[in-house]
Image (cartoon, rainbow, N blue to C red):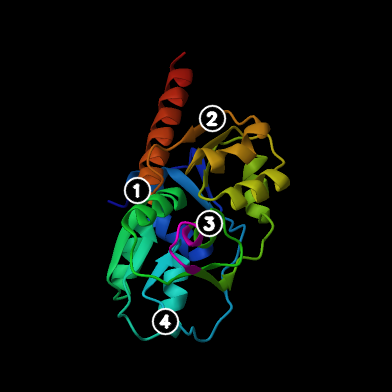
Amino acid sequence: PGQKMTTPDLILLLTRPAAAGTAFVSSLTPGLRGRARIVLSPLIDIIPLVQSVDTGDARGLVFSSAQGVRIFAGVNPTRVLPCYCVGTATTKAAIEAGFSAECAGHTADDLVANLTGRGPDAPLLHLAGLHVRGEVAERLTAAGITTQRIAIYDQPERLLTEKARSALDGELPVILTLFSPRTAQLFADQYRGSAPLHVVALSEAVAAPVRRLDPQGLTVVETPDAMSMADMVENVAARLSRVEGDQGAQ
């Protein structure tokens, strides 16, 4: 017998760059993917800015995003320098690209504290986007670990898609995942809607721009990584399912 088609009972709205959003969806359980309508609406693009990178006399590399890893790996064939990464996803991307990489912290603050305490061989190169937070290179340099930041990609902003705007103004509850303060601010600036909005944010800094929207639910994960985000999305979806079931039983 053929599989029974289920009608979506919630919307999952992803605002990450396209590749990252698709990868996040694939990390969710088949059960959730089956009951949710997935709406991908990237609020930033990833545009490489370099065709090569001269690492000069650098003794190590700092990566704060998987995008930075992939773009640098694509233009630089050597893998001899150690890599200090922010977050497990960035570290995983670096290892898969062939680098000797370690997770030096879940946040930029963690990484700065970690490296400041250890005093790795310097100078370091922070290979990042044009728009960055945390002042990693500046703070490491001030702590005596000379670090230069090179912007190897741009992140131009995009508008919410028509599908996203329609979902936000519909009747089904919307679970919105936000991974960066910039995308959270871009979403808050563009938001119009009446659908029940449930936000899952990577950190308090990410949650801050959307608090004024007064969403029906706002959850900040305890550990700022993609796995914790996926787990929390599953939890929020399960909770919404129970609420809908309770309402239907009245």
What amino acid does circle 4 point to?
Answer: Asp
Assess disc 1: are there few (<14), some (14-19) or many (≥20) residues with their C-alpha within 10 Å of its C-alpha: some
Report, in whole angstroms, how far the alpha carbon at label 3 lies from the one at label 2.
20 Å
Q: Mark 1 points at which residue?
A: 227
Q: Mark 4 points at which residue?
A: 57
Q: Tag 2 or tag 3, which sits nearer the N-term?
A: 3
Residue 243 is a magenta residue: no
Report the disc number at residue 217.
2
Q: Residue 35 occupies which quadrant of the picture?
A: top left
Observer-side mark, 2 or 4, equals 4
User: Element type at marker 3?
Assistant: loop
Q: Tag 4 or tag 2, which sits nearer the N-term?
A: 4
Q: Tag 1 or tag 4, which sits nearer the N-term?
A: 4
Report the disc number at residue 16.
3
What amino acid does circle 3 point to?
Answer: Arg
What amino acid does circle 2 point to?
Answer: Gly
Observer-side mark, 4 or 1, equals 4
Residue 173 in view (yes/no): no
Front-lying residue, 173 or 182: 182
**Pointer 4 with pointer 3, Cβ within 8 A:** no
Please name the residue shown 46% across and 44% down the image: 36
Please name the residue shown 47% across and 42% down the image: 7
Report, in whole angstroms, how far the alpha carbon at label 2 lies from the one at label 1.
20 Å
Looking at the image, residue 39 sits to the left or right of residue 103; the answer is right
Q: Position of residue 157 (x, y in %)?
A: 67, 61
Report, in whole angstroms, how far the alpha carbon at label 4 lies from the one at label 3.
34 Å
Q: Tag 3 or tag 4, which sits nearer the N-term?
A: 3
What amino acid does circle 1 point to?
Answer: Met
Residue 236 drawn above or below residue 8: above
Report, in whole angstroms, how far the alpha carbon at label 2 lies from the one at label 4.
49 Å
Please name the residue shown 40% across and 54% down the image: 111
User: Element type at marker 2?
Assistant: strand
